Image: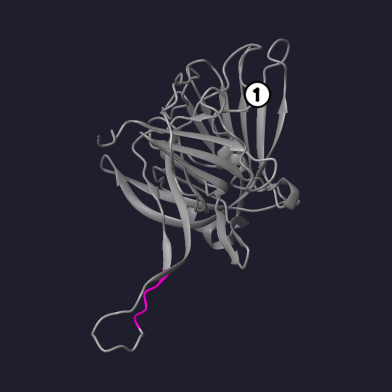
Amino acid sequence: MSMLTRRKMVLAKVETTKGTDASPTAGSNLILPNGDLQIQVPIEQDTGAGDLKSTFGPGQSVTFKQAMKLATTVRVRGLGSGASALTEPMIAPLLRASGHDVATAGDGSSTAKSATYTPTSVGANLKSNTVYFYEDGLLYKMLGAVCNLSFEAAMNALIVKAEFQSKYTAPATASFPSFTAPTEEVFRMTNTLCTMSDGSTINIGKFTFDSGAKVSEAYETGNHEFQVEDREPTITIDPLAIASAADWTALINATSFHLTATFTNSLGETLVFDAPAAVLQEISTGDRAGRITREKKFSLKETSGDDQYSIEWTSVL
């Protein structure tokens, strides 16, 4: 029987030891994708193209390296309300696997729960995930997986995009687990549920935050893994243009802004992207409903070590 396109599931859990199966479960580690997803198995082969023999064509092929990639898109949800609220959001493993550390606070009773993610360059805090990808009757296990990470919203639901990478592990047959879909509220970008300030900006139609995590492959005898090795975080917005040369002056002078974007959901929870030193890097002119827009891309800088930005979820009581 052929596989059904909707019988797919992603589970992700932070590993205690990189590359050691953390055994995620559908009850505790579900990542609910928004849209279809496909496993990719990139390989490198010696095709034997240089072999000299009595007939035309290449010689015997030899595969010497294979990996796995899984790109996923997820709608961003809150923590919930009261003492039963989540301690960390559903996408917490994605954040940890893309070079972030976390601090949690609150008990949900007297103080609302919160989870704040900040970039880290400390080796001990750079975590990996065990990712289970179920595709109908097959289970792919991605061990030691790390990923890039970006958030996007264009007057709709806020989504996060990530691409996991890991060494190859052969799939096994497995029954499709039962699961319960999350009930936490989705964050949206609307004129009432998103506010932003970059010193002058109004009328934003699109928001993108890219953590800029750079994933590199380490491959040598006896070892094949992927690591987060660097980051270049950016925020891009597209405000309506105003009759002022201020944007161009800021671009020329590499002016630094304290940039904050606050998303709210229908429950009243907040998700705040805060960048204390956002430097205007690029301006692109466009249009929206017959009005000029000037898309602005900011490069997020440090002020004192790993503090280019923070991403904070706060629940409600």
Q: Position of residue 303 (x, y in %)?
A: 72, 51
What residue sits 50% from the left and 50% below the top? 169
Q: Position of residue 159 (x, y in %)?
A: 44, 35
Foreground residue among 311 and 86: 86
Report if residue 204 is visible in the image: no
Report if residue 263 is visible in the image: yes
Residue 156, picture quadrant: top left
Foreground residue among 250 and 167: 167
- Residue that carries the numbered disc 1 in the rendered image: 87
Foreground residue among 284 and 215: 215
Horizontal side, residue 53 vs residue 18: left or right: left
The residues colored magenta run 45-49
Horizontal side, residue 16 vs residue 283: left or right: right
Q: Is residue 299 above or below residue 86?
A: below
Q: Is residue 15 above or below residue 188?
A: below
- What amino acid type is highlighted by mark number 1? Thr
